[in-house]
Every structure is written in structure tokens, then in C-alpha cells.
Amino acid sequence: NAGVTQTPKFQVLKTGQSMTLQCAQDMNHNSMYWYRQDPGMGLRLIYYSASEGTTDKGEVPNGYNVSRLNKREFSLRLESAAPSQTSVYFCASTPVTMNTEAFFGQGTRLTVV
Amino acid sequence: EDQVTQSPEALRLQEGESSSLNCSYTVSGLRGLFWYRQDPGKGPEFLFTLYSAGEEKEKERLKATLTKKESFLHITAPKPEDSATYLCAVQAPSGGSYIPTFGRGTSLIVHP
């Protein structure tokens, strides 16, 4: 049972380049999330998808777009990367949005130069 | 202003030296408080969920408690393998959603 799988694990981008971070879960969860984690800032929610076909902004959505491709997959896109988007990105999933533990992927370490 | 505040930011203990980590929150209508453990280079891993004041949960050397304003994660006789960052998250109504808000974490190092 793989749980939540993120690709890639590491990425270096030049300012202005675009890329998509992929996330897939095999637990049949309804809800999926994208967080970024910066030193001293904790986990901050970028976007989430409460269920297939819906997406909503989190605390720090600017500069990002998301797609809930199907129930299993939730991707995060950076259209024009900026150095301020250098961070570790985590995807997570929960059965539903209420009162349930989250399962996290291993993270993607992104550096924008 | 942070809704979830964890203290201390960092804690160094000797093996066997018991201590507590604190998570204080200011949200209204708490639906759940979660504790996670995060090892370097990995994603957070779930430890406990607490729902109401007075509730306690235990797992090996860890015990989590909850009051109306804060939660404590008590670590009894810690071992070096307990070294990790411990994250707290609270779930409460916010703008029509119930997405948990995370604290900044406490980095724990246990020396042998």
C-alpha cells in the first residue's frame, strides 16, 4: 500500500519556468491538499480539493494552480516560478475533510534560482 | 496573529529526561486537535486526535492531553529515536470550511 505518492522528489527551476507537481493516493480518499513548508513557518495550505470535481484556495494560493484530475490525483502547477516559491511541498489526503487524520506524501523539495 | 502557537520552538533533552511540548490555540468551536511527528526529509506522520477538553491519548512514551485553550504532548523517558519535529494542528470552522491549521512545530532532540 503506497499511500500518498509525490513526484518529483527534487527539482531545480529557473525563474519564470513552469512545472507541475504530481500527487496520487491509493486509499480512496475524497479530500486532497497541497501544503508548502518553509523554515520557521510551519505547514501552510495552498489549495485543497474537498471532493472530486472541486477545488478551493487555501492560505497562500497566489502563483499556483491546481487540478483534481480524478479521485486519485491532484496536481499543483507553477506557471511562472519565482524564488519566493522555493520550498518543500507536501501533498496530503483525508477520507473526508472533517475530524480525520491526514496522510502525507514524502514531499517535493523545489528550488527556484 | 497565529491561531496555533507551539512552544518551545526547540527542545534538547537527555535520554530519560521527561518533558512536555505545548500547543495553544485561539480558535472558536474546536472540532479536533491533531498531533503529528515529522522526521527530517519526510512528510508528517499522524500521532493523535483529541476532540474535547479532558481527553487524553497515549502511545508508547507519548501522552497527549487537551484543555479548552491548549494541548500538551508529554514525553516520558524519551529515547534518541523520539527525536523529530512535532506538529500540532487544530480544526475549527473558518470561512465555511474545516481545514486544519498547523502550528510551526517543536523540534525535539534527545541525546543519548
Image: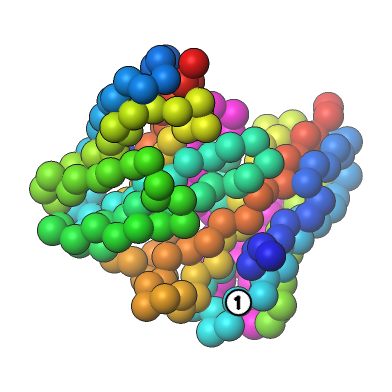
- In x, y percent, where is residue B14? 88, 36
Quadrant of residue B20 within the rendered picture: bottom right
Direction from residue A100 to residue B105 in the image, left or right: right
According to the image, label 1 marks what residue? Answer: B27
Task: Examine the structure image and report whether residue B44 is included in the region drawn in magenta.
Answer: yes
Q: Mark 1: which secondary structure?
A: loop
Q: Is residue A27 visible?
A: yes
User: What span is in magenta?
Assistant: B39-64
As drawn, B25 above or below B110: below
Q: Quadrant of the N terminus of chain B?
A: bottom right
B15 sits left or right of B84 in the view: right
Q: Amino acid at mark 1?
A: Val
Q: Is residue B31 magenta?
A: no
Quarter of the figure with residue A99: bottom left
Residue at the spot 71% in from the left edge and 72% down from the top edge: B70
Whether residue B3 is situated above or below residue A103 in the rendered picture: below
Nearer the observer, A49 or B63? A49
Question: How busy is the neighbourhood of tag 1: few (under 14 within 10 Å), some, or many (20 plus)?
Answer: some
Q: Residue at x 68, y 54 (%)?
A: B62
Q: Specify the color scheme.
A: rainbow
Residue plotted at (29% across, 25% down): A18
Q: Is residue A36 left or right of residue A13?
A: right
Residue displayed at 88% across by 44% down: B17
Q: Does residue B78 appear anywhere in the picture?
A: no
Q: Is residue B15 left or right of residue A90?
A: right
Q: Position of residue A42 (x, y in %)?
A: 60, 46
User: Residue B13 placed where, x, y %?
Assistant: 86, 39
Above or below, B100 relative to A111: below
Query: Which chain's residue wears label 1?
Result: B
Q: Quadrant of the C terminus of chain B?
A: top right
